[in-house]
Amino acid sequence: MTDLVIVSGSPGSGKTTVARHVARRFDRSVHLHTDDFWHAIVRGAVPPYLPEADEQNQTVVGIIAAAAFGYAAGGYTTVVDGVVGPWMLPHYRRVAAQHPEVAVHYVVLRPDQATTLRRAQQRTGPDALVDPGPVLALWQQFEDLGELGGHALDTSDLSAETTADALCREVALGRLRLV
């Protein structure tokens, strides 16, 4: 059985840094940075946090899920990092039905609102989302996970390394597994 770990949360939650730490812990691993899939759109891209981006986002997440399961089916522990809310999990579940040899785990990194905004605004780079409006709107979308509430990890006071430790421990115990 190969693991596919989806590391989700709002911008500024630490997804990319934690995912890199987690992926480095395995002999055969892949880190899929989902932002790269949106950047592959050369013309006609819509910022993914806008409501009118839904069709684009559904397409891109379907492609990411297929790629993630492709790597996992090939024997690579696959760590996906991105804004993967519960509303996007049907893409992963659809592909998972074809890959019973892959165990799918889902975690939402959820630092408190102030920590999230501070971390987001400390990021640099031309594509860094630092605008408080979308950052806080996305944070609020992860506030109530309903039946997936047990998949949230408060990382407000945790370093990336400590978060990776906790995440790997939870995956090993099967507590973050999607069924």
Image (tube, rainbow, N blue to C red):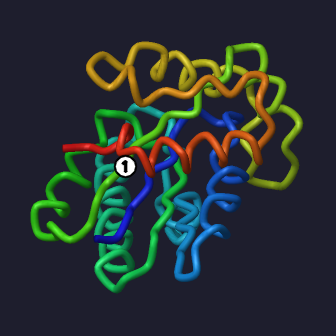
Q: What residue is shown at x 53% (from left), y 76% (from top)?
A: 29
Q: Residue furthest left?
A: 97
Q: Amino acid at mark 1?
A: His
**Which quadrant: the N terminus?**
bottom left
Q: What residue is shown at x 48% (from left), y 34% (from top)?
A: 50
Determine whether 1 is above or below 7 in the image. below
Q: What residue is shown at x 29% (from left), y 79% (from top)?
A: 73
**Which quadrant: the C terminus?**
top left
Q: Find disc 1 in the rendering and name its residue.
A: 105
Mark count? 1
Image side of residue 18 versus residue 7, left or right: right
Image side of residue 64 versus residue 22, left or right: left
Image side of residue 25 versus residue 86, left or right: right
Q: Residue furthest front?
A: 173
Determine whether 109 is above or below 102 in the image. above
How crowded pointer 1 is (Cα within 10 Å; few <14, some 14-19, many 20+) is rated as many
**Helix, strand or loop for disc 1:** strand
Q: Which of the two residues, 6 or 175, is positioned nearer the viewer here?
A: 175
Q: Which of the two residues, 19 or 164, is positioned nearer the viewer here?
A: 164
Q: What residue is shown at x 32% (from left), y 33% (from top)?
A: 86
Q: Horizontal and vertical percent for residue 94?
A: 14, 56
Q: Quadrant of residue 126?
A: bottom right
Q: Horizontal and vertical percent for residue 169?
A: 54, 45
Q: Residue furthest bottom?
A: 74
Q: Which of the two residues, 65 or 134, is positioned nearer the viewer here?
A: 65
Q: Horizontal and vertical percent for residue 104?
A: 31, 54
Image side of residue 127 versus residue 141, left or right: right
Q: Horizontal and vertical percent for residue 90?
A: 20, 46
